[in-house]
Amino acid sequence: MQPLTDFLHFGNIFFNDKTYSPETIRASIDAVAENLTKRFISNSPFVYLFAPNHIKTVYALFGIIKAGRICVLVDPALKHFELEEMMKDSPPGALIRPDRQTDVFDFYKEIEVKHYQLSPTRIKGLDDVAIMLYTAADDGFAKGAMLTHENLSVSAEAIIESISLTHGTVSCAPISYHHLFALQSGVIAPCFVEGDFIITETSSLEKTRNIARLFETRSITHFHAVPFVYYLLGKEQETAPRFSSVKLMICGGNKLSARVANNFKKNTGIDIWEGYGLTETSLAITWHPPAAVVYRDSVGLPLAGCQIRISSEDKSDIPPGQMGEICVRGKTVMKGYFCNDVATQKVIVDGWFHTGDLGKIDTNGYIHLSGLKKRMLNAGGNKIYPAELERFMKRHNNVMNVEVFGEPDELMGDKVKAKVQLRNNSPEFQKIYREWCLENITKYKVPKSFEFLS
């Protein structure tokens, strides 16, 4: 097994108006790896990285992997209901919480070493795993998707080939780094080719304006974002001249509507290229190559090295033009779910990963999504599983029943809503319950609206 870090060839990283050279980046990664190696006292291979969009997240990610550990990517805003279940499933040897106010690690402040000791059976066979992300909570419980060094390397190489990343390109992915979309396309792939990249994020309109300015000041060539960012950028004034350096605008996370795409092109003169992927496939599965015809109702063609078939309920092939479950095979498919053979064998059958997404392949080989076999909502690229959310929301002792559902939204994919039955249903207790949800459940999962049933 060749570790992912052997393939890295850094360009410059731009963050908060500062430029970080390849020498600085390599030295900082080595410092993280050395500190972890020196201080580690657990036999657990897991290091939890609470991953903000920050230069120290890049240092920590590659430092963890270089130290021979497994990086478990964690949303910095994760609340304790989710975190306590993750830590029970995969107890970490250390937790890294980067201080966003500085760009140099204070290791004894930002790395918390743990004493957990795991049974040998729980850590057997993990030597080839580089990153783990929790997902697939369609049965109510999140699972750790294990991505190997090979998974991530092959995926990065496919991205590089498909979007022509090279030394001298400048990438920007204003998407949360605890999502594989941002990390793989905006960080890992550029680092394979000495490409420069910009670290930024978007949580407000003002920050979106700052991103618009970056096209001019940093000469962005490859931009990766979710539909809502393109909607906001399309509303900016005088954006077209700023985009003169752009080679590709790439959209993922959730479906891009024709209205947003057409409005963006009208205001800027630039097409948005769309793709499709999942955490369990190390990100990308399909892509609209720039040389191909763009069909707005499609997510494109299979990437190099990725086989796709449409499966019926009995696992047999379905011919072109007919709907079924999208299945994927290739070197980007995950190793499996950590310590969950039953769940792994349910989704990986004879080497084919069953995505839980429904769709078809047309006669030209393009993939069209039509819905979900699994029970899941997509809120701006954030995957929300109603069964898991309902289980968390029912932990309040005033709750009798909860039903979580989604309402389609052109920009965000789904708006999360809930019908709730409380034992004491007064306005005061409704307010208390809403506040309890925000205190105990990660914010993006909390329903945007509550209907309290009498």
Image: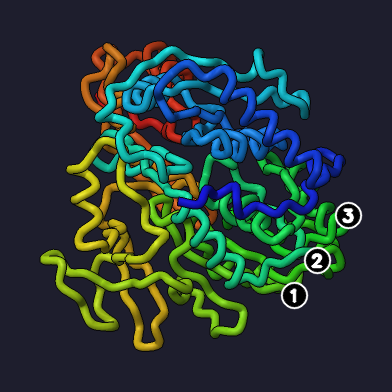
Q: Nearer the viewer, residue 16 or 4?
A: 4
Q: Is residue 409 visible?
A: no
Residue 155 on image: x %, y %: 50, 60
Q: Circle 1 sits in a helix, a strand or a loop, which is it?
A: loop
Disc with the residue nearer the chain's start (1 vs 2): 2
Residue 216 on image: x %, y %: 87, 59
Q: Is residue 252 above or below residue 446?
A: below
Residue 109: mark: none
Q: Nearer the viewer, residue 64 or 356?
A: 64
| Residue where numbered disc 3 is placed | 217
Crowd tier of the residue under label 2, counting other residues whose Cα lies within 10 Å: few below 14, some 14–19, many 20 or above: many
Disc with the residue nearer the chain's start (3 vs 2): 3
Q: Circle 3 sits in a helix, a strand or a loop, which is it?
A: helix
The answer for how far apart the CA atoms under marks 1 and 3 are is 20 Å
Q: Nearer the viewer, residue 267 or 138?
A: 138
Taking the spot 50% from the left edge, 57% from the top edge, the residue there is 410
Closer mark to the observer between disc 1 and disc 3:
3
Considering every residue shown, the one lying at the far left of the view is 314
Q: Quadrant of the C terminus?
A: top left
Q: Are marks 1 and 3 in contact (CB under 8 Å)?
A: no
Q: Circle 2 sits in a helix, a strand or a loop, which is it?
A: helix
Figure quadrant of residue 42:
top left
Residue type at the position of mark 2:
Phe
Residue type at the position of mark 1:
Gly
Q: Are marks 1 and 2 in contact (CB under 8 Å)?
A: yes
| Residue where numbered disc 1 is placed | 269
Residue 446 on image: x %, y %: 43, 31
Residue 380 on image: x %, y %: 51, 48
Closer mark to the observer between disc 3 and disc 2:
3
| Residue where numbered disc 2 is placed | 243
